[in-house]
Image (cartoon, rainbow, N blue to C red):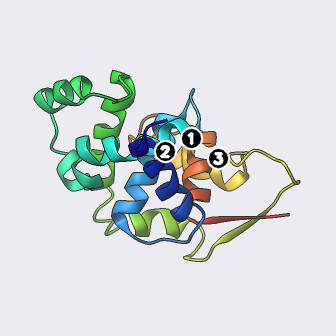
Amino acid sequence: MSRENETGIQEYDRLFGQATHDEQILFEFLVIAVFQAGLSWKVAASKIPIFRQVFADFDYHQVAGFDEPELETIMKTDGMIRNPRKVQAIITNARAIMQLAPEFPDFNSYLWHFTENNAWTMQIEPGTPPNQQSSLGTIVAKDMKKRGFKFVGPTTVQLLLIASGIIKRTD
């Protein structure tokens, strides 16, 4: 594994599970969650430096404006996971975040409103995979899909909620 990939995993491990309200980190976790589907969190997290480069340092305002030229550039980037459906989903999701207004001022407010701005505790058995589904993950996934988000099934959203500290797992 390259040094750059190791850096991405270390960065992800440092942030994973810490309650955050930072817009860029929340979008970063959404990007990783989308790309880990069918792969693993470790593979997706190892690509953080590349994702940061191709997705405007995780600024969803900029990504929402991406079109065919940016999509082509992303797909040609060395080391990028070349799944056009997932790349298009990231752009679509950035646009969906922008459409949350005026109901929600930002992605942070939207995600945290499901728990009334408090971490939601989830009892789990030791050794359970980190993306085990919960009722909250299912509710949020259904709402996100209704709002036009893509690649946001219950398992993907569960990972997003755990990564961002909205769901706290306890043994």
Residue found 21% across the figure and 55% down from its top: 61
Residue 50 percent across, percent down from the top left: 32, 41
Marks 2 and 1 in Cβ contact (< 8 Å): yes
- For disc 2, the marked residue is 45
- For disc 1, the marked residue is 42
* Tag of residue 138: 3
Q: Quadrant of the C terminus?
A: bottom right
Residue 87 visible somewhere in the drawing:
yes
Which mark is nearer the camera, 2 or 3? Answer: 2
- Mark 2 / mark 3, whichever is N-terminal: 2
Asked if residue 24 is positioned above or below residue 133 in the image, the reply reads below
The amino acid on which the numbered mark 1 sits, given as a three-letter code, is: Lys
The amino acid on which the numbered mark 2 sits, given as a three-letter code, is: Ala
Residue 98 percent across, percent down from the top left: 26, 54
| For residue 19, side relative to residue 167 (left or right) | left
Kindly state the secondary structure of the residue where label 1 is placed.
helix
Kindly state the secondary structure of the residue where label 2 is placed.
helix
Quarter occupied by residue 107? bottom left
